[in-house]
Each structure stands twice: as C-alpha cells, then as structure tokens.
C-alpha cells in the first residue's frame, strides 16, 4: 500500500510543533548529577514523618539509569493534613517574567504527588496539578507558568513583577502508618526563546535594586516621646525615600490603647503618605490586658501585622505576653520583629531566621543597667550566626543625660543608645550616632527577600532540650570555684605536649584544654597506629594524674572517628564526647556521628566540650547554657572563614550562653587568629602570641564572676516610665552620672539563672500552619 501524501495543513502543524519545541529553552534544570552533600529536599509543611529512611541523591534511580533524589518516609498514626510538602530550593531564585512557560519534574512514586511553587517574597504557595501513584516515570507539569503565577500573585494583591520562584515543592499524599517512596528527577523551569536571557536581565535589574532601611532613635526624656516627635521623625525617614522606617519601643509615652487606634493610625498615615513600610511600637490595650506591641504598616497605610512581646523578665510582670513569633511578608522580603528584653532570648532570633526572616527589627528602650557592649556584641554575633540583617531602633540621651556629649568624663557615664543597621557579617551599615536621629542604610534587595515559612527548633535529636518544657537539672554545688585554666595550642610532638602539661601542673592549673589532633589518615592507619595512639593517650592520662589536673583532648585519636576524651585529676577517664558535626569520612567503616551534647561534671563545676566543625551547630552552645555549664572547651583546627568572624561567633556565644570559653586552636595566617580564653562578657582574658611556638595560655577564673541581673526596685518602676531622671530626686550636679557606675540598680542574682526560667520553649518549635499567601 502506497502511503498517501501528507496534507499541507498537517505538515504545517508538524512543522509548527517542531519549531515551538526547538525554540523552547531551559531557564533552570536540576538533573541531580552530584551525589552526597545536603539532603536535596526539605520538609516545609504538613504531616511530619515519623522516620525518614532516605533523603539523598542516588545514582541509578533516575530516568534511564541516571541519578534522582530519593525520598523514603514513614508517616505516623495521625496525619491531620494528609499532605506533606518537600521543597527543592532553587540555588538562585528565578524572577517571574512573561517568557516562562513550564515548571515541571519527573516522578515515580507509590503515592499521589502534586507540584506546588513557592513564591517569594510574599510567602505564597501556588497549588499545581498532580499525578496518581505509579511505578513508571511521570511528568508533573505546570503549563502557562507565567500566566498562572501572575494570577496567583494578583489574587493575593501582590505584583508579579516583584515575585521570584523560590522553591519547587513535591507535595506528597500522606496516609496513616504508611510508607511513601518517591523518586524525583529532572526538575526544570523552561520558557520561550530568549527566556534565559530575560531571566538574567531581570535578575540583574533586581540585584542592583536597593532597599532603604531607616531605624529611628528618639530622645529618651520627658516631653520627647510624643506623637508629634514621632511623626516628625517619620517625615525625615520618608523624605530620605526610606522603604522601611522603624520606631523604638513605646515610641509615644501614653496610656495603652487599642491597635488599630488613634496613635497607631496616625503612624500608619505616614506610611501611606510616603509609600513606605513602618514598624511602630506602643503599649496596647486589649480588654483588661496590656501588651507591648510592634505593628507593621504597609505602603498603603494599612496595619497588616502585629507582634506582641513574647518574653519578659521578672520586673515586667505588669505586661501580658503574646504567644507567637510571626514573620511577615513584605514586597522586599520576610521581616521579623522583636521588642526590648526579648533580646535576652537568642532562640527568638534563630526561630525568626528559620521562619524565613532576612531582616529583624528590634524596637527597644534603655535597660536598667546600660552597657552597650554587652548587647551590641551579642547582636553582631547573632547576625553572623543566623544570616540576619538587623534594624535597631533605640533611644538616645540628651546632653548631660546619657553621656554622649561627655565622652571623656571621669564619671564613666555611658551613651544611652542609637539607631543602627547591621549586615549579616555583623558590620554596621548605618548609624545615627549617640545624639539620635535617623540611620539610613541601602541594602541590596537580593540580600533580603525570602518568604515566611514554618521553621523552628526540632523536638527530637541531640538538641531537643531547646524546645522541650522544663530545664535540665542544675549542676551540684562545687567546692572550688576559683580555678586556673589553661589552653595549649597546636603541638604535634607528643613529648613537647607532655612537657607543656607539666608546665600547667607547675602553675597549679585545674584544667587544660588541648588541640584537635589527627593521629591517623584512613581506616588502615586506625588499625596500624592503634597501639601507639593508645599509649599516647595513656601518657596524657598519666600527666593528668601527675599534675592533679583535669585534661581534655580531642580529634581523630584511636577509634576511627572524631571525639573528645575527658580525664580527671586521677587520670581516670570521666567520659567521651562524639563529635556531632562529624568530619570523619562517611565512607569509613568507623564513621560515627554524635547524638548528644558533651556535658560533664568535674570537681569545680560543669563543662561542655565541642570540636572544630561543631561551631556550625550553635544549638550545642544553647543546650550547654540550659545545663548551666561553667566552661566551654573548644578543640579546633578551624581557621575560617576569617578571624573577625571567629571572634564574633565565639564572643556572642559566651554572652548569650553565659560561659567561659577555652579555645585551643592552631597558628593561623591572620595576625589576629589566636588561641585564647574568653569570659561571659565576650572579652579575651588571655591569648597566644602571633607567629611563635607558645607556652600554655593560663589565666585565673572565678567561675562565680558572671553577668548579673539588674532591676530597679518596684517602687521606682511603678513611679513612672523614666527610672533615672530628675523626678527621682538626683541632684543637678549628679545628673551626668545617671547611667554610670554611680547610679546602678541593685543586682538581683545571676543573669543566666534568672533568664532560663523565663524562656518559652513552646514557641520555639516549627509551626504547623501553612505558609502565608492565598491557598
């Protein structure tokens, strides 16, 4: 049979289809060609599995024998959502442009699966099509991607030109006590001819865009915290073209009122007048309760969100507390808020970061004992730790009250405060100075962004104590609290090391922290050098006994994985800690990662040990604080990312967690890279010299010399907002001393011991509500 000639219209159709197919191009494609590393998918909402058997890239599991992301999860008996979101976060967000046509992935699963798209900075989740369970590969695809996502944004009253495709979500159907097995391959974003260039051009245009952030420092004095003064400051921020203006805590000194109410609406009108976001803060009346509340006004002057202060100190018992740590969507990204003494609880900052915040506004007022270093040092370190920008709106003092004009005064009068913007390196981007005013920082829009999500501390694993109710038992009373501590930096010669331990003993040291040693290079050497390494450890134990001194050594020592060993004054092994952020190769037959924080009780107090890459898990330090550890011992080979970062990281954790730090490091190339001992104020007490072989670094420590909790007497607190000014009867000649050493409130005990019972761990876990946006 002779085939008939193709009809002209059919040939044209075939040609058109082929032309359209050839014209389409990839904007992004993930083929999962690199195995290992971080899990490819992240659980972001819905039913939490009881167990995750696999979440990794596996060669041979993909289409035609290629690689794929393999997810195996077991669901518990209760699955209220019957759905579990597993997000693939794009390495670089894709701006929404008209040329985008399809978003897809290939899937093979034993349960139904659908596609959802995470859109930042709005926190929207687009709900796309799905497929039934099948042992065969299927494509899950969103067609007409730009039009669909544009309509979704408009439905949420947001503009598509501000939207980014942040994540592609594999939505897995969940059933009680069922196992879901899903293989995902070839995640792709495709568009018409020229789409890739359009995306690149749009991303560049957005990358050079700047967001102007303007925290405001008003004057802390009677007659200064008025609505007129507040509105005038907002006029200044507005005329500086601010995108966000931030006011300090209780920016108007007035009785509590409802929010929305007259004062908050007047502030919101300024937001509308200048087309900027504004964060205000007032005392809020709701029924018979009073809250301290930050409220977010959008560019239209609408109050679109509120955060009620969620933590309080014993002296703040007159205020009620909010029960949430929300993150808000703005057109420049996800925004977190905190207020005043919330600062004492570093969990808040981490939770806000894990819920998507890239910028946190801290609205605050003077604390009873003004000590700017103590707060600023902690905040800079948290910026580094959590990858956050901060806008700090504090109060300034007037001349003679707060000391900013008396910087050389012998009375030691400290400045009251200022407005600042900090970046994710802890550096200052803008500063009003101690005279107050508006600090204006231009932050690249791409460094903000992000969408609200449902993060928090996990309820299980080695850090479960952070989000668990109650506190671990405190350490038993120890007799000796004034000790001598030593750190010994890198010395790879065992005989020199033992000699240095004897030097510590000659100085009557109570504890010595040694470096992170590596005594073998592979599994074969573990066995080859095991006897030698055990002999070296025995000699170190003998040195501990000989010198009546506790000794901690860490590293790849004898068992094939990284650990620390604690010896007591008798040379006995107190215990071992297995490194949680384990750096032993996973290919090693000896590989083992730690499942608990290394906390040990010695005769003078409680210690915690951590090793090198453990610094990437700040949860270790927080668990140590919950156990009221006296000393943190860090044995490390780390030299990065750079010395300033290291000191900020170490110092703020000392401040936030209230411990002394013994850091035994190596000799780095940077002149300020050192081995040192640091106190709970983040100050270095003793350090090695640069570029030489150092003897042991030794210093005396009074373990009971720790930050104190200061509180004005209740009669003074109840008498008015300003505990220090003239109305307190301070003579005119002494007013300059108001925030100096001559006028300090009484100490009411150990700061950490006071703060720990004030934590609210019920707020620190992941949220169960869906992320924001139209559903």
Image: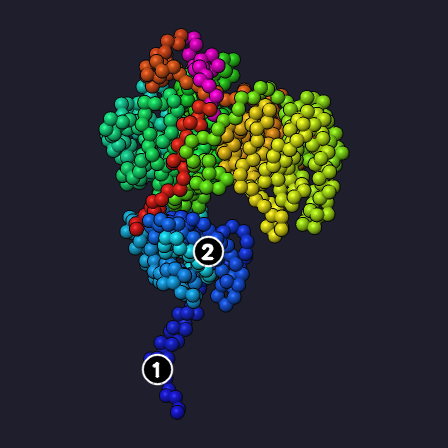
The disc at residue 304 is none
- Residue at 31%, 38% in the rendered image: 305
How far across and down, in percent of the image, does residue 273 sit? Answer: 28, 37
| Rendered residue at 39%/44% (across/down) | 454
The residue under the point 30% across, 49% down is 774
Q: Toward the viewer: 215 or 60? A: 60
> Which residue occupies 43% across, 70% down?
22
Q: Which residues are magenta?
A: 732-752
Q: Is residue 117 magenta?
A: no
Mark 1 surroundings within 10 Å by alpha-carbon count, few (fewer than 14), some (14 through 19), many (20 or more): few
Local SS, label 2: strand
Say which element carries label 1. helix
The Cα atoms of the two marked residues, 1 and 2, are separated by 49 Å
Q: Which residue is mark 2?
A: 71
Q: Is residue 16 above or below residue 356?
A: below
Q: Image quadrant of residue 485?
A: top right
Judge whether residue 210 can be spotted in this image.
no
Q: Position of residue 705 (x, y in %)?
A: 54, 20
On screen, residue 604 versus residue 299, left or right, reads right
Location of residue 349 in the rendering, given as x and y in whole percent from the top left corner: 43, 35
Residue 263 located left or right of residue 351? left
Between 535 and 313, which is closer to the camera in this rendering? 535
In the picture provided, is 618 more to the left or to the right than 584? Answer: left
Q: Which numbered mark, 1 or 2, is in the foreground of this view? A: 2
Tell me how the rendering is colored: rainbow
Local crowd at mark 2 within 10 Å, few (<14), some, or many (≥20)?
many
- Circle 1 is placed at which residue position? 8
Seen in the image, is 233 located left or right of residue 543? left
- Can residue 307 be seen in the rendering of this structure? yes
């Amino acid at each position: 049979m002779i085939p008939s000639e193709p009809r002209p219209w059919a040939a044209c159709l075939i040609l058109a289809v082929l032309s359209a197919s050839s014209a389409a191009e990839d904007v992004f494609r993930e083929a999962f060609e690199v195995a290992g590393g971080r899990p490819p998918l992240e659980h972001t909402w819905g039913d939490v599995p009881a167990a995750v058997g696999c979440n990794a890239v596996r060669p041979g599991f993909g289409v035609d024998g290629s690689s794929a992301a393999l997810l195996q999860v077991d669901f518990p008996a209760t699955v209220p959502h019957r759905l579990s979101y597993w997000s693939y976060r794009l390495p670089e967000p894709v701006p929404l442009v008209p040329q985008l046509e399809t978003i897809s992935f290939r899937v093979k699963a034993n349960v139904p699966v659908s596609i959802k798209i995470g859109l930042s900075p709005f926190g929207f989740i687009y709900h796309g099509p799905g497929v039934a369970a099948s042992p065969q590969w299927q494509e899950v695809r969103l067609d007409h991607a730009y039009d669909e996502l544009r309509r979704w944004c408009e439905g949420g009253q947001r503009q598509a030109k501000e939207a980014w495709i942040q994540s592609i979500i594999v939505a897995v159907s969940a059933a009680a006590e069922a196992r879901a097995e899903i293989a995902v391959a070839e995640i792709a974003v495709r568009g018409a001819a020229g789409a890739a260039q359009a995306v690149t051009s749009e991303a560049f245009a957005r990358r050079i865009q700047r967001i102007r952030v303007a925290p405001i420092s008003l004057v802390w004095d009677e007659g200064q915290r008025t609505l007129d003064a507040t509105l005038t400051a907002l006029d200044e921020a507005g005329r500086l073209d601010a995108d966000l203006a931030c006011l300090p805590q209780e920016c108007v000194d007035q009785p509590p009122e409802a929010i929305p109410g007259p004062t908050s609406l007047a502030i919101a009108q300024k937001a509308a007048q200048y087309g900027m976001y504004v964060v205000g803060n007032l005392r809020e009346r709701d029924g018979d309760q009073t809250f301290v509340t930050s409220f977010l006004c959008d560019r239209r002057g609408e109050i679109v969100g509120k955060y009620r202060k969620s933590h309080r100190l014993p002296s703040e018992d007159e205020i009620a507390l909010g029960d949430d740590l929300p993150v808000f969507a703005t057109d420049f990204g996800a925004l977190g808020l905190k207020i005043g003494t919330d600062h004492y609880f570093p969990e808040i900052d981490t939770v806000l970061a894990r819920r998507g915040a890239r910028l946190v506004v801290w609205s605050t007022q003077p604390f009873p004992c003004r000590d700017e270093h103590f707060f600023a040092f902690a905040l800079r370190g948290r910026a580094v730790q959590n990858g956050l920008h901060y806008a700090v709106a504090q109060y300034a003092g007037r001349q003679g009250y707060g000391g900013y004009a008396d910087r050389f005064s012998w009375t030691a009068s400290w400045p009251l405060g200022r407005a600042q913007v900090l970046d994710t390196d802890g550096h200052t981007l803008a500063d009003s100075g101690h005279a107050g005013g508006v600090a204006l920082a231009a932050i690249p829009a791409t460094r903000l962004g992000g969408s609200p999500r449902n993060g928090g501390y996990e309820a299980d694993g080695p850090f479960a104590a952070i989000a668990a109710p109650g506190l671990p038992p405190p350490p038993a009373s120890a007799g000796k609290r004034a000790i001598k501590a030593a750190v010994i930096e890198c010395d790879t010669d065992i005989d020199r090391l033992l000699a240095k331990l004897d030097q510590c003993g000659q100085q009557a040291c109570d504890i010595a922290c040694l470096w992170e040693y590596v005594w073998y290079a592979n599994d074969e050497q573990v066995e080859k050098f095991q006897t030698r390494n055990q002999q070296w450890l025995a000699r170190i134990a003998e040195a501990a006994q000989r010198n009546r001194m506790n000794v901690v050594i860490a590293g790849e020592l004898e068992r094939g994985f990284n650990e620390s060993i604690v010896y007591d004054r008798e040379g006995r092994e107190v215990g071992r800690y297995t490194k949680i952020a384990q750096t032993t190769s996973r290919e090693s037959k000896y590989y083992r990662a730690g499942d608990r924080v290394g906390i040990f009780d010695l005769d003078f107090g409680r210690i915690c040990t951590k090793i090198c890459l453990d610094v990437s898990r700040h949860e270790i330090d927080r668990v140590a604080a919950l156990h009221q550890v006296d000393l943190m011992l860090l044995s490390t080979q780390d030299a990065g990312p750079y010395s300033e970062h290291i000191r900020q990281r170490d110092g703020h954790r000392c401040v936030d967690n209230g411990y002394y730090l013994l850091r035994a490091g190596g000799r780095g190339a940077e002149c300020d890279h050192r081995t040192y001992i640091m106190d709970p104020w983040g100050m270095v007490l003793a350090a090695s010299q640069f570029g030489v072989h150092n003897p042991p670094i030794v210093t005396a420590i009074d373990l009971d010399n720790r930050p104190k909790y200061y509180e004005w007497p209740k009669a003074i607190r109840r008498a008015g907002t300003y505990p220090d000014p003239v109305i307190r009867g301070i003579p005119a000649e002494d007013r300059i001393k108001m925030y100096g050493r001559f006028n300090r409130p009484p100490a009411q005990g150990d700061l950490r011991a006071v703060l720990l019972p004030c934590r609210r761990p019920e707020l620190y876990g992941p949220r169960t509500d869906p992320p924001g946006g139209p559903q």
